Image (cartoon, rainbow, N blue to C red):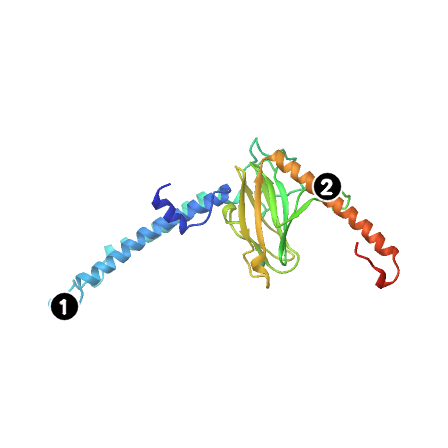
Amino acid sequence: MGHATSTLAFFTPLSGGSQNANEIDSLYKILLVIALVIFVAVMGALVYALVKFRARKGAVPAQIRGNTRLETGWTAAAALILVALAVVTFTKLSAIQNPPNSGPEGAQLAAGDGGTLLASASRKLPPDGKALNITVIGRQYIWQYVYPGANEPDGLGAPYSYEEMVVPTNTTVSLDIVSSDVVHAWWVPELGGKFQAVPGYHNYTWFKIPKPGVFKGQCAYLCGRAHARMIATVRAVPPAQFEAWLANQKRLIAAANAEAKVARAKLGAQTGAGQVENP
Ligand SMILES: [Cu+2]
């Protein structure tokens, strides 16, 4: 990584967490370099003309009225550049939109883990159809993540976490982004693009993190007074560690529910509002 690369990186999208983010970043850099070359050429010609033909006695530039060859030339050149930009973009698009399969070192998933996942125009699935599905729920002012593993017949009882999402490395993670109140936006820059969480609507994205790490994000859509506190973290850990974490999360939730049940029963057995003790 040279100095020029890091200077360029300051102006370009964050990446490094997932392949789709890397492709967005490299596409941006290619377009930026092409735009910079054109910018320098146009500004160079302008500055040259300004200096060379600035107001002074006797300096009269060539009086050209129409030059068919020149005009056809720059029209064709501009069209060619646009075609090149379109080709580069469409070449990259598939790797940005379509998730790859999980790696062999990734979590062992069943097809459609976490409910039946159906590919659609908006939801892309890996070629083998196996992805770890996590539902991302935006809510004033916290992100909630619901993982596969519902143990109740009605689909409830799935483990969940708040603010920090834990995922296995080398595993394709498919996100189903929703909101339970107002519009929010899920954005962890190093893992890819920004996706809105809109009430009554599903938005999908994915990521696949090769190495353990922590990636920081933030709600990217002004959603109310405490919007700035609506942070998000994605922590990638080896699959075995993820399984252990998920099992522990399930245990903690079950224990808290059992405790709440006891407290509720205690509360219900009491009479008179004034006698309610702190459970
Ligand atoms: Cu927000």
| Image location of residue 223, percent across then percent down | 59, 61
Nearest the eye: 131 or 165: 165
| Image location of residue 200, percent across then percent down | 65, 57
The quarter of the displayed image where residue 141 is located: bottom right
Q: Is mark 1 within 8 Å of ligand 1?
A: no
| Image location of residue 12, percent across then percent down | 42, 50
Along the polypeptide, which appears first: circle 1 or circle 2? Answer: 1
Q: Is residue 109 visible?
A: yes
Using residue 50 as the reference point, say whether residue 249 is left or right of it: right
Amino acid type shown at disc 1: Arg
- Label 2: few (<14), some or many (≥20) within 10 Å? few
Label 1: state its secondary structure: loop
Q: Residue at x 63, y 43 (%)?
A: 133
Nearest the eye: 263 or 172: 263
- For the N terminus, give its image quadrant: top left
Name the disc covering residue 251, or none: 2
Amino acid type shown at disc 2: Arg
Say above or below: 158 vs 111: below
The quarter of the displayed image where residue 269 is located: bottom right
Label 2: state its secondary structure: helix
Which residue position is annotated with label 1?
56
